[in-house]
Image: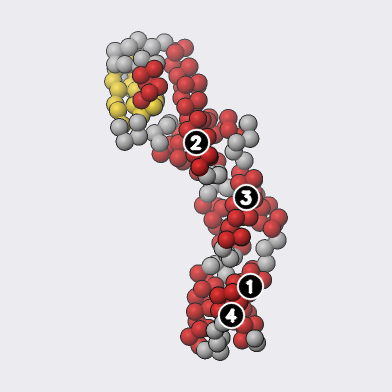
Amino acid sequence: MTITAVEKNKDKGMVKVFIDDNYSFSIPEQDYINNKLYKDTIISEEQLSVIRDKVLVRSARERAVRYLTYKDRSEYEILKKLVDAGYDESVAQNAVNELKTIGYLDDTRFAMKYLSERIRTKALSKKTLGYELKNKGLEKEIIERALSEFEINDYEVALREGKRKFGKYDINDKKIQQKVYRFLLHRGFSYEIADKVVRELKKN
């Protein structure tokens, strides 16, 4: 087999390698240089396997660890970032699998930590929190289990936030009431919950 072409993507620091005129893999430019994968170079099946299964996966894994150093992320988020960085999806998935095996990636742990921080910093409905976790690629079972651990009561959360934000206002004022409705609906609470909160605030 012969490397018949290489294409450099300077924006991502990656190099696409073509073997016998067919796309074979993408590799970080430094690894490309270190392994001397230049055009017209002869490469064996064994060498190709080492590149795909060891060199690339190690590189993707190391990059993923850097991502996790800056911010905790779900498996899906890490996979997407690696693919966006230029790694082939199969390489990115293998790197993710290795990180799961050694405990660097754990969607259940991620979900619990994410919910803990979100609940502490922002009053959101249970539905909205679940939607956010779903957008991070978490499985339905993990989301439901994490939400159940926190025993989130939408009414209590909405009432607490309503008191915090509108406690100093005259809730009998129709304009203020509309602001309360809009605020709570925007946070993902149902109209019924918002209405119940408004009625409770009017008592005070």
Among the two numbered marks 4 and 1 on one chain, the one whose residue lies closer to the N terminus: 1
Q: CA distance from mark 3 to mark 4?
A: 30 Å
Secondary structure found at label 1? helix
Q: Position of residue 139 (x, y in %)?
A: 60, 47
Secondary structure found at label 3? helix
Which residue corresponds to mark 2?
66
**Mark 2 Cα shell of 10 Å, populated few (<14), some (14-19), many (≥20):** few
Which of label 3 and label 4 is nearer to you? 4
Residue at position x 53%, y 67% from top? 187
Which residue corresponds to mark 3?
113
Residue at position x 57%, y 47% from top? 138
Q: CA distance from mark 4 to mark 1?
A: 10 Å
Residue at position x 50%, y 25% from top? 58
Which residue corresponds to mark 4?
167
Among the two numbered marks 3 and 1 on one chain, the one whose residue lies closer to the N terminus: 3
The C terminus is located in which quarter?
Answer: bottom right
- Position of 129 relative to 43 (above/below): below
- Label number found at residue 160: 1
- The residue type indicated by label 3 comes to Lys
Q: Position of residue 121 (x, y in %)?
A: 57, 61
Left or right: where 20 falls relative to 127: left
**Mark 3 Cα shell of 10 Å, populated few (<14), some (14-19), many (≥20):** few
- The residue type indicated by label 4 comes to Gly
Among the two numbered marks 4 and 2 on one chain, the one whose residue lies closer to the N terminus: 2
